[in-house]
Amino acid sequence: MTHSRRAFSLGLAALPLVAACGNGIGSNNAQRIDARVDATLNQLYADYPGTRRLGENAAGVLTMPLVTEAGLGLGGAYGRGALRVGGATVDYYSVAKASGGLQIGAQQYAHVLFFMTEDALMTFRRSPGWAAGANVEYATPAQGETLAAETTTSLAPVIAVIFGQSGLRLGATLEGVKYTRIIP
């Protein structure tokens, strides 16, 4: 158990290094985050037209325009984004992840969480730090394809779309990720 605590602590200590890889450190500007969120949603809806319907039917949409993830044995990820309800930004969030194990490389990606129910959205907004878990359904379409009908009409409370991956590390997931409200 001590080894896993140590690995987790070292992973958390590595987060500032990961964050320095272009995730807006020193640019806590709300307008900059909003502009990145706009660009990310425009790209998502253009590349994956089926996601537009998700956005229209969602109670809220959390967009993380750029998450940087890196690891060499121990790893971490960091990004910033905004939660929108009815198309308007209501809060800003950071996302952080620490990991340990057989891993090497770095990657960047964007992800969007569609809160499909008011209850899921309220649970997210009321929590001091929300972690993605079993209640998240993943939709990972290939470039240019639309999401399957069963995904967009799913009764899942939260649907996550991960896209725009680049880098030399495989396996972008949101498991073990913690979202925390920030003041930009």
Image: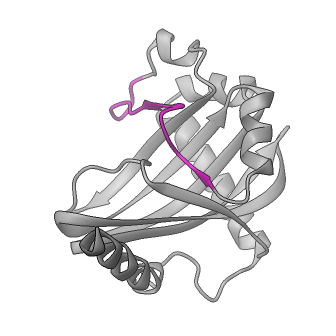
Residue in front for this viewpoint, 136 or 51:
136
Above or below, 175 against 28 in this view is above
Residue 142 is one of the magenta-drawn residues? yes
Q: Position of residue 161 (x, y in %)?
A: 49, 38
Residue stretch rendered in magenta on the structure: 130-145
Residue depicted at 58% across the width and 84% down the height:
25
Q: Residue at x 34, y 82 (%)?
A: 10
Q: Position of residue 24 (x, y in %)?
A: 58, 78
Q: Residue at x 63, y 35 (%)?
A: 114
Q: How many marks?
A: 0
Q: Nearer the viewer, residue 85 or 94?
A: 94
On-image quarter of the N terminus: bottom left
Image quarter of residue 113:
top right
- Residue 17 sits in quarter: bottom left
State whether the magenta stretch is mostly helix, strand or loop: loop
Place of residue 55 in the rendered image (x, y in percent of width and height, measured from the top left): 68, 31
Colouring rule applied to residues: one colour
Q: Observer-nearest residue: 129 or 153?
A: 129
